[in-house]
Image (cartoon, rainbow, N blue to C red):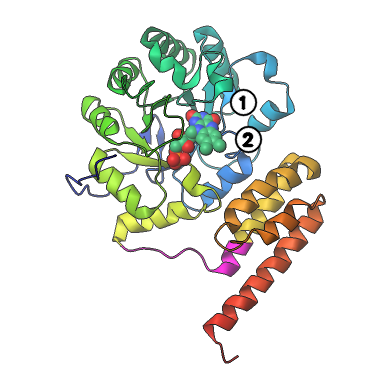
Amino acid sequence: MQQPMQPTVQKPLQQPLQIGPYKLDNNLMLAPMAGVTDRPFRQLCKRLGAGLVVSEMLSSNPKVWNTAKSQARMNHEGEEGIRSVQIAGADPELMAQAAQFNVENGAQIIDINMGCPAKKVNKKLAGSALLQYPDTVESIIKAVVNAVDVPVTLKIRTGWNPENRNGVDIARIAEQNGIQSLAVHGRTKACMYKGEAEYDTIRRIKAAISIPVIANGDITSPQKAQEVLNYTGADGVMVGRGAQGKPWIFKQIQHYLETGETLAPPPLSQQFEILYEHVTNVQGFYGDTAGVRIARKHVGWYLSEHDTDRQFRKTFNAIDDATEQLDALNAYFQALQTRENRQISPAA
Ligand SMILES: Cc1cc2nc3c(=O)[nH]c(=O)nc-3n(C[C@H](O)[C@H](O)[C@H](O)COP(=O)(O)O)c2cc1C
């Protein structure tokens, strides 16, 4: 059972982080999520208040760069703001080459993935499995930092299992070898996504190094963001699943950190506009066939609080046509709005 967090010091709102030459708008980051933080979602989160958005991880293996999946992940056309691109792999030379390739392709920050516990990634000894091999960690960091002129950041977990929370050692290696900002997910590799994130290790890491530390894991509300910042002393927070279907969470967190007041979610009409734009962009980005499929999961997240019996989602997920998808959303939100209006003025 996790101890409740005791806020130590109420931290004043920090100055926006500077990562190399880049000054962020604020210290709130969208976590890299494969299959989620594609260009349409990153752009949306940026517009709705994220200070930095990180791309889905890209394998350092050049053999897969020509696949449709990698090509979509490498697509930054028209992307506004700072482009932080995450790479994953275990071979220092391949990682260095991948970093160079992505910088040539427009990356302004290279983020190294040592946080992903996915079997697919770890089978090839990468992601958070690397935490077990500090020498390899050091070689990868050195190779990538030396290979590119842009800032290199790192994302880790707290260790590889609860008995081996070596996050502080890894953080020191990161700092000594030129990493400019460190994001830490408060779970070990072995924990996958189970249990609650713990913030003690993040707090120890923050106390041990001088580069910016970004706290990550289970931050799903402005209040939680404030608590985690206070407890860990971290310089910023990174939000992953909490932004799924709620890209406005960044604005809500920023507002709370600035004022101590809770900002309500956008009204239904605005939520509809955001979702409609998001689905349209997903369809445009991937093309109708893949776009329709990929849009479904996002719609599911947006509607989880409205469509509690999942009836609409069942119908929606059976739609294969892009225009029909948009029409169905339009009709659904109109009905929701009518219901909400009736509740506000029952006499009408
Ligand atoms: C669907 C999904 C995909 C993810 N993909 C990546 C990834 O590509 N790279 C990475 O470093 N972490 C990845 N993560 C981990 C997240 O970045 C984040 O550390 C984790 O979800 C904890 O943060 P949260 O509780 O705010 O979601 C992924 C997580 C999820 C749920």
287 in relation to 333, above or below:
above
Where is residue 119 drawn, in percent x and y?
Answer: 55, 22
Is 86 contained in the magenta span? no
Is 271 contained in the magenta span? yes
257 in relation to 27, above or below:
below
Query: Which numbered disc covers residue 162?
Result: none
Q: Amino acid at mark 2?
A: His
Mark 2 or mark 1, which has the lower sequence index? Answer: 2
Mark 1 close to ligand 1, CB under 8 Å: no
The kind of secondary structure element at disc 2 is loop
Mark 2 close to ligand 1, CB under 8 Å: no
Gap in angstroms between the C-alphas marked 2 and 1:
8 Å
Where is residue 116 drawn, in percent x and y?
Answer: 49, 26
292 in relation to 85, above or below:
below
User: Taking 163 as reference, is 104 left or right?
Assistant: right
User: Taking 210 as reference, is 92 left or right?
Assistant: right
Q: Nearer the viewer, residue 99 or 162?
A: 162
Q: Which residue position is annotated with label 1?
A: 105
**Do the residues bearing badges 2 and 1 touch, measured as CB atoms within 8 Å?**
yes
Callout 1: few (<14), some (14-19), or many (20+) C-alpha neighbours within 10 Å?
few
Q: Amino acid at mark 1?
A: Asn
**Magenta part of the chain:** 261-272
**Residue at the image point whose x is 45% and y is 17% from the top:** 129
Q: Which residue position is annotated with label 2?
A: 76
Where is residue 39 drawn, in percent x and y?
Answer: 62, 40
The single residue placed furthest to the bottom in the displayed view is 347
User: Taking 78 as reference, is 328 left or right?
Assistant: right
**For residue 311, what is the image quadrant?**
bottom right
